[in-house]
Image (cartoon, helix red, strand yellow):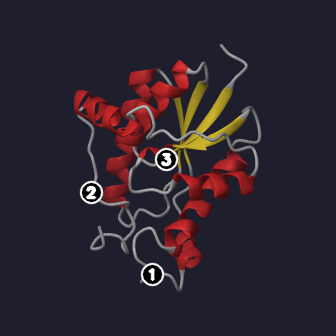
Amino acid sequence: MTDKKILLHTCCGPCATASVERLLEDGWEVDLFYSNSNINTPDEYRRRLDGVIKTADYFGLQWHEDEYLHDAWLKTVEGFENEPERGRRCGLCFKYSLSRTAAASICGYNGYSTTLTISPHKNSKLLFEIGNSEGNFIEYDFKKKNGFFRSIELSKQLELYRQQYCGCEFSMNRI
């Protein structure tokens, strides 16, 4: 047991793998928080949750599932549906999930971070700005130290489903 406890916003199992590995190496006790109201179908949502559970089991971690509120998420990004990937819609989406993670991290955690920074398709600087605006955010750029490539290795080892899009219906044809 450590006095460093972090809640890790987790988008999927593959992104969690190397992120968790790094946090554990840095002496953190990690709980996973699956918050993905942006996922457009229940089947896709469940496939990604299954990967989170498999990853949590592999590392011996606790995991928590946020309420799936796709309609509320749609209202958050309303008016920005036609934005390109990495556009303003993505920032609103990040804020939605990170604000929910920040709220969940208030009790029992030193702070929270997000696996989203492991992706070469996500803007870590923007994620840090949004996370810090919510408070209690711990900055980790998980793509550093070959994090993304390590996540691919671990995903293959654990036979995790690796998706080809962020999850929202607006990104499916824009990658």
Which residue occupies the foreground of this view, 17 or 66?
A: 17
The quarter of the picture where the C terminus appears is bottom left
Count of marks, rendered view: 3
Residue 32 placed where, x, y %? Answer: 53, 36
Q: For the residues marked 1 and 2, what is the alpha-carbon distance in whole angstroms?
A: 19 Å
Q: Residue at x 57, y 71 (%)?
A: 72
Q: Sequence order check: which comes first, mark 1 or mark 2?
A: 1
Q: Residue at x 73, y 57 (%)?
A: 133
Q: For the residues marked 2 and 3, what is the alpha-carbon distance in whole angstroms?
A: 16 Å
Q: Is residue 164 above or below residue 26?
A: below
Q: Secondary structure at mark 2?
A: loop
Q: Disc 3 marks which amino acid?
A: Thr
Q: Which mark is residue 50?
A: none
Q: Secondary structure at mark 1?
A: loop
Q: Is residue 136 above or below residue 60?
A: below
Question: Image check: 90 left or right of 42?
Answer: right
Q: Is residue 51 above or below residue 120?
A: above
Residue 29 placed where, x, y %? Answer: 61, 23
Q: Which mark is residue 117?
A: 3
Find disc 1 in the rendering and name its residue.
Answer: 81
Q: Disc 2 marks which amino acid?
A: Gln
Find disc 2 in the rendering and name its residue.
Answer: 164
Q: Secondary structure at mark 3?
A: helix
Q: Residue at x 60, y 42 (%)?
A: 113
Q: Disc 1 marks which amino acid?
A: Glu
Q: Residue at x 53, y 86 (%)?
A: 79
Of tags 3 and 1, which is closer to the observer? 3
